[in-house]
Image: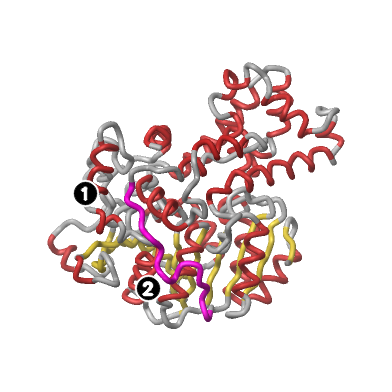
């Protein structure tokens, strides 16, 4: 596991500068926003305001101490109509993962203040390893070199503290920041991927008052699902990949390159003796990664045709495009995923098979054409995991008006899982599923036009209008 984690280290984004208030005067305004010190460092951050809030490390045992949560606010450009809270995915991602899409969100929700907290354990909020994940450390927010060993030793030396970084405590955090920083106007809540799990956990155990609506982007499967958890991520990835291949077979312009069918072409490519020389280790992971974005997925037939001929040029081009998309998240002050937090929460609450072994992962991968590295990252890592509390697997008894945006070709949070989840949530309130045909994960990024249409209609007129607008839009369908 340690070796697998280290392989991800180069992908983590380094922190550039500390953005939280630092002067004595600013620190006195603990629960009030002040101008962010990094507001002039990047155009996207212009005019942003920052604050920190002190909250319990453990809400069930508040005497155990405190942590701090960081929140960044982007004030409305006109007269504010209210607040739209934006909850990042992860679980290791900070709010900075949403910064590149602020203009899309502003267009969907004009004249709303946008507020983006960093989850506990991420960004400028208190980290699991405060020293090793500090902006001033060797690797910035990413662990580097000996920091891996020091960090994991600290996590084990302080197991009670480590085990307090749970989804439920993070859900209480979300209630705290929304309640303490609320302005009394209209208020909406957006969550993406893991953020949808966190939002729903909050609604189940500690819902804030006066919430006008919820927007769930790429809804996670039910926590009780034993087949759609992270240990089965490769199956979800492979299912989407095979659908893409079937779509290719149905189009003469695509199928002409694969007379035996696109699936056979992938098998032939994977059986080549030189496949790792062309793609690198774990070629199924490399092909699976191309499914994450419509732009790189569209290049898959070219990639396969080239690899059939022993030419990796198209794969190298697609990989560069993938890297450019990933670079959208770079250079933000608190950017970078917390691998310790990913490991802690994923293994504690999103793994239906705690007995998973490397041999099982390898055996299962034999039947896939496309795969994900996530199951391998669920193996024992040395992090002291925790037992989920009684709220695990429960659904909110009541939800505000809610819209779910889901891609039909999402390789991370499957469309079928969203449908099953919504069927359960529908007993708790008004909820609409709108499906984006051919879209992948993270609709605000991968299908921005559809995001704008649906969210704006929802905020202005409710779920019915969003459903109707979305169903009539090109590339969309009503469920």
Q: Is residue 354 left or right of residue 62?
A: right
Check if residue 384 falls in the magenta segment.
Answer: yes
- What percent of the width, then of the height, locates residue 346? 44, 52
Q: Is residue 42 left or right of residue 254?
A: left
- What percent of the width, then of the height, locates residue 33? 28, 67
- What percent of the width, then of the height, locates residue 368? 66, 38
Regarding residue 332, the answer to whether it shows in the image is: no
- Residue identified by numbered label 2: 175
Q: Is residue 279 above or below residue 288?
A: above
Check if residue 246 falls in the magenta segment.
Answer: no
Disc number for residue 85: none
In the image, the segment drawn in magenta is 383-398
- Residue identified by numbered label 1: 157
- Quadrant that contains the N terminus: top left
Q: Is residue 1 above or below residue 155?
A: above
Give the residue displayed 35% in from the left and 77% down from the top. 179
């Amino acid at each position: 596991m340690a070796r697998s984690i280290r392989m991800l280290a180069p992908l983590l984004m380094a922190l550039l500068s500390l953005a939280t208030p630092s002067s004595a005067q600013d620190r006195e305004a603990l629960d009030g926003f002040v101008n962010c010190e990094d507001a002039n460092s990047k155009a996207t951050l212009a005019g942003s305001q920052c604050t920190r809030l002190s909250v319990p490390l453990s809400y069930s045992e508040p005497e155990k101490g405190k942590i701090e949560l960081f929140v960044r606010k982007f004030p409305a450009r006109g007269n504010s109509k209210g607040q739209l809270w934006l909850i990042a995915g992860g679980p290791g991602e900070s709010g900075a993962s949403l910064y590149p899409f602020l203009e899309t969100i502003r267009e969907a929700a004009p004249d709303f203040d946008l507020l983006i907290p960093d989850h506990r354990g991420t960004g400028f909020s208190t980290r699991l390893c405060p020293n090793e994940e500090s902006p001033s450390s060797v690797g910035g927010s990413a662990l580097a070199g000996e920091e891996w060993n020091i960090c994991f030793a600290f996590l084990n030396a302080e197991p009670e503290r480590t085990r307090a970084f749970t989804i439920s405590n993070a859900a209480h955090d979300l209630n705290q920041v929304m309640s303490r920083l609320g302005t009394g106007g209209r208020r909406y809540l957006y969550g993406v991927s893991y953020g949808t799990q966190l939002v729903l956990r909050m609604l189940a155990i500690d819902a804030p008052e006066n919430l006008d609506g919820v927007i769930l982007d790429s809804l996670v499967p039910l926590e009780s699902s034993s087949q759609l958890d992270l240990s089965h991520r490769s199956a979800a990835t492979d299912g989407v990949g095979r659908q893409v291949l079937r779509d290719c077979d149905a189009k003469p312009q695509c199928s002409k390159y694969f007379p035996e069918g696109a699936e056979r072409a992938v098998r032939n490519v994977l059986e080549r003796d030189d496949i790792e020389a062309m793609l690198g280790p774990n070629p199924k992971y490399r092909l699976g990664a191309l499914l994450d974005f419509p732009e790189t997925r569209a290049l898959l037939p070219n990639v396969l045709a080239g690899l059939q001929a022993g030419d990796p040029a198209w794969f190298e081009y697609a990989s560069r495009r993938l890297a450019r998309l990933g670079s959208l998240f770079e250079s933000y002050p608190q950017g970078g995923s917390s691998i310790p937090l990913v490991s802690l929460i994923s293994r504690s609450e999103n793994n239906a098979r705690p007995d998973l072994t490397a041999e099982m992962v390898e055996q299962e991968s034999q039947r896939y054409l496309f795969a994900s590295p996530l199951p391998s990252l669920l193996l024992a890592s040395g992090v002291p995991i925790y037992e989920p509390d009684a709220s695990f697997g429960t659904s909110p008894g009541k939800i505000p008006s809610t819209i779910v945006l889901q891609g039909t070709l999402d390789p991370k949070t499957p469309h079928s899982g969203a449908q099953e989840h919504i069927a359960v949530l529908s007993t708790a309130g008004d909820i609409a599923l709108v499906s984006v045909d051919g879209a992948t994960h993270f609709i605000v990024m991968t299908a921005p036009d559809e995001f704008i249409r649906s969210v704006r209609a929802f905020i202005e007129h409710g779920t019915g209008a969003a459903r109707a607008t979305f169903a009539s839009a090109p590339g969309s369908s009503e469920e």
